[in-house]
């Protein structure tokens, strides 16, 4: 229910990743600015659940549970092979809108969410 009718950013990231540390606050701010129609789901590549929680706490992201097999399934299903990666999905249909969400956010932070609608 939290994602139906919204734009969903599936965010593959990890605490050990320096580019992730730079991008996560940008994504968190964008999510907060568009909380009515944009949700971020964090898919951790961390080495432990504690590391995942420390890295993602306070950012306003939903999280795939650390012990869930769905984390690996999402990596394979969305062909993710590096972090950070932001895959944008239509929350109603599950259709992938773009696998280049991070580039879109960095290039056009003011208009990217609107362009995904």
Image: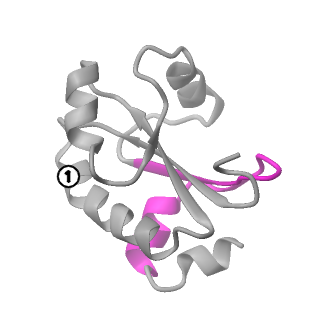
Report x, y in % for residue 17: 21, 41
Q: Against 90, is 109 above or below?
A: below
**What residue is at 25 percent from the left and 18 percent from the top?**
48
Is 27 on the left-hand or right-hand side of 4? Answer: left
Work out which residue is located at the far bottom of the displayed protein and give it.
Answer: 110
Residue in the picture at 52% in, 68% down: 35
Dividing the picture into quarters, in which one does residue 27 lie?
bottom left
Q: Is residue 36 above or below residue 17?
A: below
88 drawn magenta: yes
**Left or right relative to 37: residue 18:** left
Res 82 quadrant in image: top left
On the image, the x and y values in percent for residue 46 come to 28, 26
Horizontal side of residue 8 vs 19, given as left or right: right
Residue 32, percent from left and from top: 42, 69
Callout 1 environment at 10 Å: few (<14), some (14 to 19), or many (20+)?
some
Q: Secondary structure at mark 1?
A: helix
x, y (%) of residue 59? 32, 54
Q: Is residue 11 magenta?
A: no
The residue indicated by pointer 1 is: 21
Answer left or right for 14 relative to 35.
left
Most distant residue in the front direction:
1
- The range drawn in magenta is 85-108
């Amino acid at each position: 229910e939290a994602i139906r009718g919204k734009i969903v950013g599936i965010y593959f990231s990890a605490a050990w990743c320096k580019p992730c540390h730079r991008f996560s606050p940008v994504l968190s701010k964008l999510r907060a600015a568009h909380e009515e129609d944009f949700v971020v789901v964090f898919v951790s590549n961390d080495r432990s659940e504690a590391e995942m929680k420390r890295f993602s706490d306070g950012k306003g992201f939903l999280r795939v549970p650390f012990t869930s097999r769905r984390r690996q399934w999402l990596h394979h299903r969305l062909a993710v092979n590096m972090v950070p990666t932001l895959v944008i999905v239509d929350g109603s249909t599950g259709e992938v809108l773009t696998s280049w969400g991070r580039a879109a956010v960095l290039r056009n932070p003011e208009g990217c969410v609107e362009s995904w609608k």
